[in-house]
Image (cartoon, grey):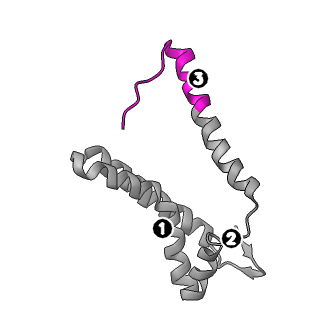
Amino acid sequence: MVTLKVEGKQAPAGSVIRFFALTYLVSWTCFIAARNAIDGLRLPLLLLGTFAPSLVAVGLTAQAGKRAGVSALLSRMLDGRVALRWYLFAAGYMAAIKLGVALLYRAGHGSLAALRP
């Protein structure tokens, strides 16, 4: 059985499996619905499917730990004590990935892809 310890507390048995199962269900339901949706609903469904892991995590945390659990989970996002080098790393990493994909595309297709808004 998979167990998870966070800050000295052990998660309930099966909670990791429950998280992955719900995440898979919500994400792929949104993606399949987006494939068959009309144009106005396609993007919202894709975004919902993309953010499903975060939303499922918040929902399960709210169910298990109530307000204190959710605030402990989300407080890490607003922690301002992050060194500048990590912000630079995140921005540089995204730029490097985009540049790498553009170069691979050019190598494979002989030209750069057209930019669309």
Tell me the residue at 58%/22% (across/down).
104
Q: CA distance from mark 1 to mark 2?
A: 23 Å
- Indicate which disc, 2 or 3, sits on the residue closer to the N terminus: 2
Residue bounds of the magenta highlight: 99-117
Viewport quadrant of the N terminus: bottom right
Dot 1 falls on a residue whose secondary structure is: helix
2 and 3 marks in contact (CB < 8 Å): no
- Residue 67 is situated, as x and y percent measured from the top left of the image, at 54, 87
Identify residue type, mark 2: Gly
**Could you tell me which residue is drawn at 59 percent across and 30 percent down?**
99
Residue position marked by numbered label 3 in the rendering? 103
The residue identified by callout 1 is 55
Number of other residues with Cα within 10 Å of mark 3, as a class: few under 14, some 14 to 19, many 20 or more: some
- Magenta span has 30? no
- Sequence order check: which comes first, mark 3 or mark 1? 1
Asked if the residue at tag 2 contacts the one at tag 1, i.e. Cβ–Cβ closer than 8 Å, the answer is: no
Residue projecting furthest to the top: 110
65 or 17, which lies in front? 65
Earlier residue among tags 1 and 2: 1
Q: Give the numbered dot on residue 80.
A: 2
Does 106 appear in magenta? yes
Q: How far apart in space, not on screen, are marks 3 and 1 (Cα)?
A: 34 Å
Label 2 element class:
loop
Q: Nearer the viewer, residue 20 or 44?
A: 44
Q: Is residue 90 left or right of residue 98?
A: right
Residue 90 location, x and y as percent? Answer: 66, 50
Across and down, in percent, residue 20 comes to 55, 61
Mark 3 residue element: helix
Residue drawn at (58%, 85%) of the image: 65
Rendered position, 20 above or below 57: above
